[in-house]
Amino acid sequence: MRNYFFLSLLTILSVSCSDGDLEIETIDFDSVSLQYCTAPVATTKNILFKINDTEALILELQSGVLNKGVVGETITTQSTVPSQSKLTYRIFSGDVDDDYFCDDIPTVEPTVIDQVEAEDGLVIIETTSDAENGNFVHTISLSGISFVTESGQRITNLSISEFGTVTTEIPEG
């Protein structure tokens, strides 16, 4: 009986104890469309994001990384995370929409519950020309992304083969 009591007590303690940290089990944005507030510009830093209900994946592309197109060729460029581009994963208290990122005055709700910055990885951009429409088409993917939460939980080797596609104008001249 005594052994049963201790076993029950251990079970109750192991189930009831929690360090209060939010556990991130998976980061899945494969089926979510890429969004942005202003059309990407080849020569400046660009903020792109994906929203999945109460989660967001925010990519801040380094300035000029989209400016690598050559008409008639496919060019692949890379940007390292976090030294050149920045990738942030956020969890919100409720559903979030593009107004959260695009409004001049940020919304009060939902609030950010947790935020994790990527510590490693690559942003891979494949650029082709759509000369007929006067655009470069940039297909963005992520590879080897590694997030580490405050509690030390590591989410590593996250890959999104198609983060999204954006266009920029082919410069005249």
Image (cartoon, helix red, strand yellow):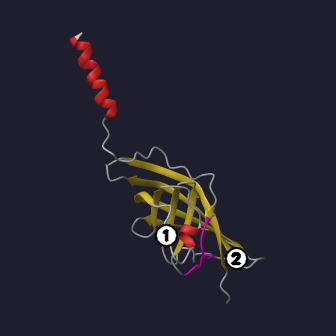
Label 1 with label 2: CB-CB less than 8 Å? no
Q: Nearer the viewer, mark 1 or mark 2?
A: 1
Indicate whether 58 appears above or below 93. below
x and y, in percent, of residue 139 in the image: 62, 64
Q: Residues within 10 Å of mark 2 (few under 14, many from 20)?
A: some
Considering depth in this image, is 146 or 26 the residue closer to the camera?
26
Q: Check the image and report above or below for 3 versus 166.
A: above
Using the numbered discs, state the Cα–Cα distance from disc 1 to disc 2 in whole angstroms: 21 Å
Residue 31 tag number: none
Q: Quadrant of the C terminus?
A: bottom right
State which quarter of the image contains the N terminus.
Answer: top left
**Residue with the mark numbered 1:** 60
Question: Which residue matches tag 2?
Answer: 135
- Seen from the viewer's position, the closer of residues 132 and 10 is 10
Examine the structure image and report whether residue 39 is included in the region drawn in magenta: yes
- Secondary structure under tag 1 reads strand
Q: For the residue labelled by badge 2, is the local secondary structure a helix, a strand or a loop?
A: strand
Residue under the point 40% across and 45% down: 23
- Amino acid type at mark 2: Asn
Magenta span covers which residues?
A: 35-43
State the residue at coordinates (31%, 24%). Answer: 11
Image x and y of residue 72, in percent? 70, 73
Point out the residue furthest to the left here.
2
Furthest residue toward front:
108
Q: Earlier in the sequence, mark 1 or mark 2?
A: 1
Dot 1 crowding, Cα within 10 Å, few <14, some 14–19, many 20+: some
